[in-house]
Image (cartoon, rainbow, N blue to C red):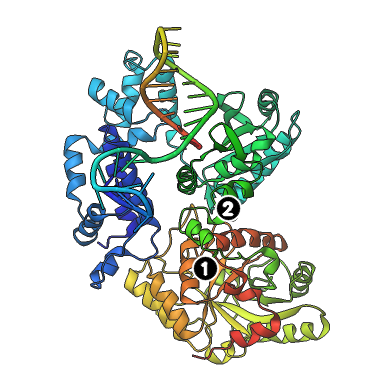
DNA sequence: GCCGTTTTCGGCCCGACTGTTTTCAGTCG
């Protein structure tokens, strides 16, 4: 069984959980959690790298001890330290930590006093009324635990960024009508454009908190109130999404926005910088002693620690602070930089609209070009185009292009990559197209080596232009294919072809980390809507968000090129 | 457990809300 970075991260998380329950040094616990994050986000597979005889590179927060444990896990699949911890505490106990309201101290107490080690045992103890008798617990806590267990099955859901956008915008509109409100904005992972969000963090500025919170409670979408204070409240909406609302005075807007945008590791790093300068940074502002020296704007907060403003999408403590300090922050790609879309479906296959309608919508959105890329025959459910129908579509595009002004339709296809890596249409037809978008739509579960080779072989095809939705994942649905994305990216460089960042909110594939890797290898990324209806072009904003998280600039994106620059790039040279 | 031109030891980010307390620990974000 190959060991992935995610497996190593999971082991470190479990160690951190178990250590925490044992009341270990909290900083030691944090070291394991930081290491879990670092290794989980690391772009290269550690096991593969070690198997190649390479050395584990120096990573921040990973010293001699953790590096040795990583090597142990990557090479043996085991971690003796974790096994030792599991012999001291039942491993199932960590699931109790996932119940809201139960932290390490209470879990330890439940285990020591009532020998509770599973959710079932916890539920039984609560029903028997034995939990309320423990010191620090009471009737209310016992009831809350029972309810949390009941909700547990449906809990821990993450929401697609598109869905979260709808809930967020409606609630923001409600809050703006509250008395005395100056600003109301969504912060948190939503503002960082993460592909999914677990909850919504909303920041409101006003002189008085209480009237705002009273107004919040009148929102008719609220299903449950988790906490309700004058400056901080948490509610659950009917959709199940949790919303945390904070009210702060207007002069704290920048500090609060920074604080609640996160990420947590980014904030910790910034506050540490402040500390080194004798400053205290919290959501109210930046303070030297009792004097507030910054905080009205985010810029002022960054300036207080000697940095330029850092775009929210970069705030993951993945090198953005170092880049900011060195003046090397990228100028991230924006929606307005896109000059066209290279992956769109018409009603010839499974799209809703005809070519003329699509072209007019593209022109309305300010595009110079639009590639029509319907499916190939293998995807029969979409009424995919065979050579003959594709040929007719090419003629139709030629006719339309003579007539249309300010927009150019490109002749393309989204051709299936078959199981053996061949393409689902004859070479001579593919050769007549402006571009060939190729994608996997079947056999998602091939073994890693076979799946990778399949895609590499497809890229060897002389007409292959662009690999669509490279991992094939659907968020909350299909897991990503098991492929060696590093090799695919390097192969794209060698073959002079490109990767897509598919902007459909359930795809957002490439992910941010692979965008960074593509950029490092000099492989251009196309940000495409994969539109099937006109409204789908709106999804491009989510693709842009993901690209920004991947540090991409306009230069790193294929479809920011003008039509004249683009066309030669679509021709394969290797 | 990590880290370091002030440090190889002694630090390691900060505040609100809840419930069970009679002044605060635990949890959460």
On what subunit does the disc labeled 2 rest? A
- For marks 1 and 2, give the one nearer the viewer: 2
Circle 1 crowding by C-alpha within 10 Å: few under 14, some 14–19, many from 20: many
**In the displayed structure image, the side of residue A414 where residue A16 appears, left or right:** left
Question: In x, y percent, where is residue A452?
Answer: 38, 74
Q: Is residue A112 above or below residue A485?
A: above
**A163 relative to A490, above or below:** above
In this rendering, position of residue A463 left or right of residue A144 = right
- What numbered label is drawn on residue A340? none
Q: Residue A235 vs residue A534: left or right?
A: left
- As drawn, the label of residue A469 is 1
- Is A388 above or below relative to A444? below
**Spot occupied by residue A543 in the image (x, y as percentages of width and height):** 60, 62
Residue at 48% x, 90% y is A574
In this rendering, would A352 be left or right of A442?
Answer: right
Looking at the picture, tell me which residue is in the foreground, A306 or B25. A306
Q: Secondary structure at mark 2?
A: helix
Q: Quadrant of residue A362?
A: bottom right
Nearer the observer, A502 or A327: A327
Residue A396 appears anywhere in the view: yes
Q: Chain of mark 1?
A: A
Report whether residue A419 is seen.
no
The residue that label 2 is drawn on is: A312
Secondary structure of the residue carrying numbered label 1: loop
Q: Earlier in the sequence, mark 1 or mark 2?
A: 2
Image coordinates of residue A105 in percent, x first then y, are 32, 27
Frontmost residue, A274 versus A226:
A274
Q: Residues within 10 Å of mark 2 (few under 14, many from 20)?
A: many
Q: Where is residue A437 shown, x and y percent of the image? A: 56, 77
Instruction: Count every numbered label the image shows and give the total.
Output: 2
């Amino acid at each position: 069984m190959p060991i992935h970075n995610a497996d190593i991260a999971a082991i470190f998380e479990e160690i951190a959980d178990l250590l925490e329950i044992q009341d270990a040094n909290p900083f030691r616990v944090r070291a394991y959690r930081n290491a879990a994050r670092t290794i989980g986000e690391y772009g290269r597979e550690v096991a593969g790298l070690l198997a190649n005889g390479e050395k584990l590179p120096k990573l921040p927060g990973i010293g001699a001890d953790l590096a040795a444990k990583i090597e142990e896990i990557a090479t043996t699949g085991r971690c003796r330290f974790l096994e030792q911890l599991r012999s001291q505490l039942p491993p199932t106990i960590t699931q109790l930590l996932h119940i809201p309201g139960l932290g390490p101290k209470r879990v330890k107490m439940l285990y020591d006093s009532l020998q509770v080690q599973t959710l079932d045992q916890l539920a039984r103890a609560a029903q028997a009324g034995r939990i309320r008798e423990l010191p620090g617990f009471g009737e209310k806590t016992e009831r809350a635990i029972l309810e949390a267990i009941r909700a547990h099955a449906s809990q821990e859901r993450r929401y697609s960024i598109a869905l979260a956008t709808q809930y967020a915008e409606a609630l923001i509109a409600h809050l703006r009508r509250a008395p005395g409100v100056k600003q109301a904005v969504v912060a948190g992972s939503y503002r960082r454009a993460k592909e999914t969000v677990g909850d919504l963090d909303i920041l409101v500025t006003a002189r008085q908190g209480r009237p705002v919170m009273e107004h919040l409670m009148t929102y008719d979408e609220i299903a449950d109130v988790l906490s309700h204070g004058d400056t901080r409240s948490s509610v659950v909406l009917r959709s199940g999404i949790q919303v945390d609302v904070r009210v702060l005075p207007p002069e704290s807007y920048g500090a609060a926005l920074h604080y609640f945008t996160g990420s947590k590791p980014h904030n910790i790093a910034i506050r540490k910088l402040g500390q080194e300068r004798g400053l205290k940074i919290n959501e109210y502002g930046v303070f030297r002693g009792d004097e507030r020296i910054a905080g009205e704007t985010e810029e002022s907060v960054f300036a207080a620690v000697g940095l330029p403003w850092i775009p929210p999408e970069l705030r993951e403590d993945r090198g953005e602070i170092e880049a900011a300090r060195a003046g090397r922050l990228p100028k991230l790609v924006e929606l307005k930089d896109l000059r066209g879309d290279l992956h769109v479906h018409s009603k010839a296959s499974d799209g809703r609209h005809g070519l003329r309608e699509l072209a007019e919508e593209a022109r309305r959105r300010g595009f110079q070009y639009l590639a029509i890329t319907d499916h190939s025959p293998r995807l029969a459910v979409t009424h995919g185009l065979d050579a003959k129908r594709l040929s007719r579509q090419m003629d139709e595009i030629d006719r339309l292009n003579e007539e249309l002004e300010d927009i150019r339709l490109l002749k393309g296809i989204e051709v299936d990559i078959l199981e053996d890596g061949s393409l689902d249409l004859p070479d001579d037809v593919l050769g007549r197209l402006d571009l060939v978008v190729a994608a996997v739509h079947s056999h998602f579960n091939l073994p890693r080596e076979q799946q990778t080779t399949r895609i590499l072989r497809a890229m060897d095809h002389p007409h292959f232009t662009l690999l669509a939705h490279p991992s094939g994942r659907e968020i909350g649905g299909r897991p990503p294919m098991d492929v060696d994305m590093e090799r695919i990216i390097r192969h794209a460089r060698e073959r002079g072809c490109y990767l897509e960042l598919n902007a459909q909110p359930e795809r957002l594939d490439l992910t941010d980390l692979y965008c960074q890797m593509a950029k490092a290898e000099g492989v251009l990324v196309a940000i495409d809507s994969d539109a099937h209806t006109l409204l789908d072009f709106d999804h491009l904003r989510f693709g842009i968000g993901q690209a920004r998280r991947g540090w991409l600039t306009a230069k790193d994106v294929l479809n920011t090129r003008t039509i004249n620059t683009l066309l030669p790039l679509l021709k394969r040279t290797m």
